[in-house]
Amino acid sequence: MADELRVMWDFSDLPATEARLRDRLASAIGDAERAEVLTQLARVEGLRGDTVAGQQMLAEAEALAAPDSPGRVRVFLERGRLLRSAGAPEEALPLFVAAFVLASHLGETFLAVDAAHMAALVDNVDDWTGRGVELASSSDDPQVRGWIGALFNNLGWARFEAGRFEEALAAFRSALAAREETSDDVHEVEVARYAVARTLRALGQPAEAAGLMGRAIAASPPDGWFHEELAEDYAALGWRNEASDQARRALDLLDAHQAPDRVARLRELANA
Protein backbone atom coordinates (compact mmCIF):
# COMPACT_ATOMS: atom_id res chain seq x y z
CA MET A 1 0.00 0.00 0.00
CA ALA A 2 3.00 2.27 -0.42
CA ASP A 3 1.45 4.47 -3.11
CA GLU A 4 -1.73 4.89 -1.07
CA LEU A 5 0.24 6.08 1.94
CA ARG A 6 2.32 8.55 -0.05
CA VAL A 7 -0.69 10.35 -1.48
CA MET A 8 -2.15 10.78 2.01
CA TRP A 9 0.78 12.96 3.04
CA ASP A 10 0.83 16.74 3.02
CA PHE A 11 3.75 17.84 5.17
CA SER A 12 2.41 21.40 5.24
CA ASP A 13 -0.92 20.23 6.72
CA LEU A 14 -0.42 17.61 9.42
CA PRO A 15 -4.03 17.72 10.71
CA ALA A 16 -5.37 16.86 7.25
CA THR A 17 -2.74 14.15 6.86
CA GLU A 18 -3.67 12.67 10.22
CA ALA A 19 -7.37 12.74 9.33
CA ARG A 20 -6.78 10.80 6.12
CA LEU A 21 -4.63 8.24 7.91
CA ARG A 22 -7.17 7.78 10.70
CA ASP A 23 -9.95 7.33 8.15
CA ARG A 24 -7.88 4.59 6.56
CA LEU A 25 -7.19 3.01 9.94
CA ALA A 26 -10.93 2.92 10.67
CA SER A 27 -11.69 1.11 7.41
CA ALA A 28 -11.77 -2.65 6.90
CA ILE A 29 -8.06 -3.40 6.50
CA GLY A 30 -5.90 -6.31 7.57
CA ASP A 31 -3.14 -6.32 10.15
CA ALA A 32 -0.37 -5.72 7.59
CA GLU A 33 -1.96 -2.54 6.27
CA ARG A 34 -2.95 -1.46 9.75
CA ALA A 35 0.68 -1.69 10.85
CA GLU A 36 1.82 0.52 7.97
CA VAL A 37 -0.83 3.16 8.67
CA LEU A 38 0.14 3.22 12.34
CA THR A 39 3.75 3.91 11.41
CA GLN A 40 2.64 6.95 9.43
CA LEU A 41 0.56 8.23 12.32
CA ALA A 42 3.68 7.79 14.45
CA ARG A 43 5.53 9.96 11.97
CA VAL A 44 2.88 12.65 12.30
CA GLU A 45 3.39 12.61 16.07
CA GLY A 46 7.14 12.77 15.61
CA LEU A 47 6.83 15.84 13.40
CA ARG A 48 4.72 17.41 16.14
CA GLY A 49 7.43 16.64 18.67
CA ASP A 50 5.41 14.04 20.60
CA THR A 51 7.93 11.22 20.82
CA VAL A 52 5.97 9.29 23.46
CA ALA A 53 2.82 9.09 21.34
CA GLY A 54 4.89 8.14 18.33
CA GLN A 55 6.64 5.31 20.16
CA GLN A 56 3.31 3.98 21.44
CA MET A 57 1.96 3.78 17.90
CA LEU A 58 5.10 2.07 16.69
CA ALA A 59 4.76 -0.54 19.44
CA GLU A 60 1.24 -1.27 18.16
CA ALA A 61 2.51 -1.44 14.59
CA GLU A 62 5.36 -3.78 15.51
CA ALA A 63 2.94 -6.19 17.15
CA LEU A 64 0.93 -6.37 13.91
CA ALA A 65 3.72 -6.41 11.31
CA ALA A 66 5.27 -9.68 10.16
CA PRO A 67 9.07 -9.86 10.61
CA ASP A 68 9.76 -9.73 6.85
CA SER A 69 7.26 -7.11 5.75
CA PRO A 70 7.08 -3.49 4.58
CA GLY A 71 5.36 -2.73 7.87
CA ARG A 72 8.44 -3.85 9.79
CA VAL A 73 10.65 -1.72 7.52
CA ARG A 74 8.48 1.27 8.35
CA VAL A 75 8.68 0.52 12.08
CA PHE A 76 12.49 0.61 11.84
CA LEU A 77 12.42 3.82 9.80
CA GLU A 78 10.00 5.74 11.99
CA ARG A 79 11.58 4.58 15.24
CA GLY A 80 14.90 5.79 13.88
CA ARG A 81 13.39 9.14 12.90
CA LEU A 82 11.95 9.59 16.37
CA LEU A 83 15.32 8.85 17.98
CA ARG A 84 17.15 11.23 15.64
CA SER A 85 14.64 13.98 16.39
CA ALA A 86 15.12 13.31 20.10
CA GLY A 87 18.87 13.91 19.76
CA ALA A 88 20.01 10.27 19.68
CA PRO A 89 21.55 9.77 16.22
CA GLU A 90 23.80 6.92 17.39
CA GLU A 91 20.75 4.94 18.48
CA ALA A 92 18.91 5.82 15.27
CA LEU A 93 21.60 4.56 12.89
CA PRO A 94 21.17 0.77 13.49
CA LEU A 95 17.45 1.17 12.83
CA PHE A 96 18.06 2.96 9.52
CA VAL A 97 20.55 0.26 8.55
CA ALA A 98 18.03 -2.46 9.46
CA ALA A 99 15.37 -0.68 7.39
CA PHE A 100 17.75 -0.43 4.43
CA VAL A 101 18.73 -4.11 4.57
CA LEU A 102 15.19 -5.42 4.97
CA ALA A 103 13.69 -3.10 2.36
CA SER A 104 16.40 -4.08 -0.13
CA HIS A 105 15.72 -7.76 0.59
CA LEU A 106 11.99 -7.24 0.02
CA GLY A 107 12.47 -5.22 -3.16
CA GLU A 108 10.90 -2.16 -1.52
CA THR A 109 13.19 0.28 -3.30
CA PHE A 110 11.42 3.47 -2.24
CA LEU A 111 11.75 2.52 1.42
CA ALA A 112 15.35 1.36 0.95
CA VAL A 113 16.31 4.73 -0.53
CA ASP A 114 14.44 6.53 2.25
CA ALA A 115 16.47 4.52 4.76
CA ALA A 116 19.73 5.38 2.97
CA HIS A 117 18.71 9.04 3.00
CA MET A 118 18.14 8.91 6.77
CA ALA A 119 21.36 6.98 7.42
CA ALA A 120 23.26 9.66 5.48
CA LEU A 121 22.01 12.23 7.99
CA VAL A 122 23.53 10.39 10.95
CA ASP A 123 26.50 8.49 9.50
CA ASN A 124 28.92 8.78 6.57
CA VAL A 125 27.03 11.04 4.20
CA ASP A 126 29.15 10.20 1.14
CA ASP A 127 28.77 6.42 1.56
CA TRP A 128 25.05 6.41 2.23
CA THR A 129 24.29 8.96 -0.47
CA GLY A 130 26.14 6.74 -2.92
CA ARG A 131 24.06 3.72 -1.91
CA GLY A 132 20.83 5.66 -2.15
CA VAL A 133 21.64 7.20 -5.53
CA GLU A 134 22.70 3.83 -6.95
CA LEU A 135 19.38 2.29 -5.96
CA ALA A 136 17.26 5.24 -7.06
CA SER A 137 19.05 5.56 -10.40
CA SER A 138 18.38 1.91 -11.22
CA SER A 139 14.62 2.33 -10.74
CA ASP A 140 12.01 3.14 -13.38
CA ASP A 141 9.60 4.42 -10.71
CA PRO A 142 9.43 8.25 -10.92
CA GLN A 143 8.80 8.50 -7.18
CA VAL A 144 11.89 6.46 -6.40
CA ARG A 145 13.97 8.50 -8.85
CA GLY A 146 12.64 11.59 -7.10
CA TRP A 147 14.93 10.73 -4.19
CA ILE A 148 18.05 11.48 -6.25
CA GLY A 149 17.67 15.24 -5.92
CA ALA A 150 17.08 15.05 -2.17
CA LEU A 151 20.09 12.78 -1.64
CA PHE A 152 22.45 15.05 -3.57
CA ASN A 153 21.00 18.11 -1.84
CA ASN A 154 21.77 16.69 1.62
CA LEU A 155 25.24 15.68 0.46
CA GLY A 156 25.83 19.17 -0.88
CA TRP A 157 24.92 20.90 2.36
CA ALA A 158 27.05 18.49 4.40
CA ARG A 159 30.02 19.33 2.21
CA PHE A 160 29.19 23.04 2.25
CA GLU A 161 29.08 23.13 6.05
CA ALA A 162 32.45 21.36 6.10
CA GLY A 163 33.92 24.06 3.86
CA ARG A 164 34.31 21.65 0.92
CA PHE A 165 32.81 24.11 -1.54
CA GLU A 166 34.02 22.61 -4.83
CA GLU A 167 32.66 19.20 -3.82
CA ALA A 168 29.46 20.83 -2.58
CA LEU A 169 29.03 22.54 -5.95
CA ALA A 170 29.31 19.21 -7.75
CA ALA A 171 26.66 17.68 -5.48
CA PHE A 172 24.32 20.65 -5.85
CA ARG A 173 24.66 20.59 -9.63
CA SER A 174 23.74 16.90 -9.58
CA ALA A 175 20.75 17.75 -7.35
CA LEU A 176 19.61 20.45 -9.77
CA ALA A 177 19.91 18.13 -12.76
CA ALA A 178 17.90 15.49 -10.92
CA ARG A 179 15.20 17.98 -9.90
CA GLU A 180 14.91 19.25 -13.46
CA GLU A 181 14.46 15.68 -14.66
CA THR A 182 12.06 14.35 -12.02
CA SER A 183 10.17 17.22 -10.37
CA ASP A 184 7.01 18.95 -11.53
CA ASP A 185 7.35 21.45 -8.67
CA VAL A 186 8.87 24.66 -10.05
CA HIS A 187 9.81 25.96 -6.62
CA GLU A 188 11.58 22.70 -5.75
CA VAL A 189 13.68 23.04 -8.89
CA GLU A 190 14.53 26.65 -8.11
CA VAL A 191 15.50 25.80 -4.52
CA ALA A 192 18.05 23.43 -6.05
CA ARG A 193 19.26 26.29 -8.26
CA TYR A 194 19.55 28.50 -5.17
CA ALA A 195 21.93 25.98 -3.57
CA VAL A 196 24.17 26.12 -6.64
CA ALA A 197 24.15 29.92 -6.49
CA ARG A 198 24.91 30.01 -2.77
CA THR A 199 27.95 27.81 -3.33
CA LEU A 200 29.17 29.82 -6.30
CA ARG A 201 29.17 32.91 -4.08
CA ALA A 202 31.15 31.01 -1.45
CA LEU A 203 33.66 30.21 -4.21
CA GLY A 204 34.00 33.88 -5.10
CA GLN A 205 31.77 33.82 -8.19
CA PRO A 206 28.95 36.27 -7.30
CA ALA A 207 28.20 37.27 -10.89
CA GLU A 208 27.38 33.67 -11.85
CA ALA A 209 25.39 33.30 -8.63
CA ALA A 210 23.39 36.46 -9.37
CA GLY A 211 22.51 35.17 -12.82
CA LEU A 212 21.14 31.95 -11.37
CA MET A 213 19.16 33.77 -8.69
CA GLY A 214 17.61 36.12 -11.20
CA ARG A 215 16.40 33.06 -13.08
CA ALA A 216 15.10 31.43 -9.89
CA ILE A 217 13.19 34.56 -8.83
CA ALA A 218 11.62 34.94 -12.28
CA ALA A 219 10.45 31.32 -12.36
CA SER A 220 9.30 30.76 -8.78
CA PRO A 221 6.68 32.12 -6.39
CA PRO A 222 8.04 34.87 -4.11
CA ASP A 223 10.71 33.53 -1.75
CA GLY A 224 12.58 35.65 0.78
CA TRP A 225 15.62 33.36 0.74
CA PHE A 226 16.01 33.90 -3.00
CA HIS A 227 15.97 37.68 -2.64
CA GLU A 228 18.36 37.43 0.31
CA GLU A 229 20.86 35.48 -1.79
CA LEU A 230 20.57 37.93 -4.67
CA ALA A 231 21.14 40.79 -2.23
CA GLU A 232 24.34 39.12 -1.04
CA ASP A 233 25.43 38.48 -4.63
CA TYR A 234 24.91 42.13 -5.54
CA ALA A 235 26.70 43.25 -2.38
CA ALA A 236 29.69 41.09 -3.30
CA LEU A 237 29.70 42.74 -6.72
CA GLY A 238 29.63 46.19 -5.12
CA TRP A 239 26.14 46.99 -6.44
CA ARG A 240 24.85 48.69 -3.31
CA ASN A 241 21.53 50.01 -4.63
CA GLU A 242 20.55 46.69 -6.17
CA ALA A 243 21.59 44.86 -2.99
CA SER A 244 19.51 47.25 -0.89
CA ASP A 245 16.43 46.68 -3.04
CA GLN A 246 16.73 42.89 -2.83
CA ALA A 247 17.35 42.99 0.93
CA ARG A 248 14.15 44.99 1.43
CA ARG A 249 12.20 42.46 -0.61
CA ALA A 250 13.69 39.64 1.45
CA LEU A 251 12.71 41.34 4.71
CA ASP A 252 9.16 41.76 3.44
CA LEU A 253 8.88 38.09 2.54
CA LEU A 254 10.68 36.30 5.37
CA ASP A 255 8.68 35.39 8.46
CA ALA A 256 9.29 36.79 11.93
CA HIS A 257 11.12 33.70 13.19
CA GLN A 258 14.44 34.24 11.43
CA ALA A 259 17.69 34.28 13.38
CA PRO A 260 18.52 37.76 14.72
CA ASP A 261 21.88 37.87 12.93
CA ARG A 262 20.20 37.07 9.63
CA VAL A 263 17.68 39.89 10.07
CA ALA A 264 20.44 42.26 11.17
CA ARG A 265 22.48 41.48 8.05
CA LEU A 266 19.49 42.09 5.79
CA ARG A 267 18.76 45.38 7.51
CA GLU A 268 22.39 46.37 7.06
CA LEU A 269 22.14 45.66 3.33
CA ALA A 270 18.75 47.35 3.04
CA ASN A 271 20.05 50.55 4.61
CA ALA A 272 23.35 50.63 2.74
Image: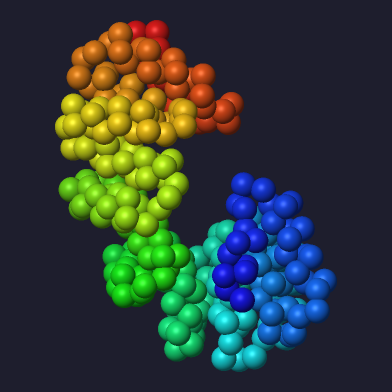
Q: Quadrant of the C terminus?
A: top left
Q: Residue at x 44, y 15 (%)?
A: 248
Position in image of residue 271 (x %, y %): 40, 8
Please say which color scheme the image uses: rainbow
Position in image of residue 95 (x %, y %): 52, 77
Q: Residue furthest bottom?
A: 67
In-image side of 41 versus 263 (left or right)? right
Q: Is residue 177 above or below residue 24?
A: above
- Tally the numbered discs: 0
Q: Quadrant of the N terminus?
A: bottom right
Q: Residue at x 60, y 52 (%)?
A: 11
Position in image of residue 48 (x %, y %): 68, 53
Q: Is residue 191 above or below residue 260?
A: below
Quadrant location of residue 171? bottom left
Q: Is residue 171 above or below residue 2?
A: above
Q: Which of 111/198 is in front?
A: 111
Quadrant location of residue 262? top left
Quadrant location of residue 257? top right
The answer to whether residue 246 is visible is yes
In-image side of 198 versus 113 (left or right)? left
Q: Residue at x 41, y 65 (%)?
A: 142
Q: Which of 117/187 is in front?
A: 187
Position in image of residue 117 (x %, y %): 42, 66
Q: Residue at x 45, y 85 (%)?
A: 107
The answer to whether residue 261 is visible is no
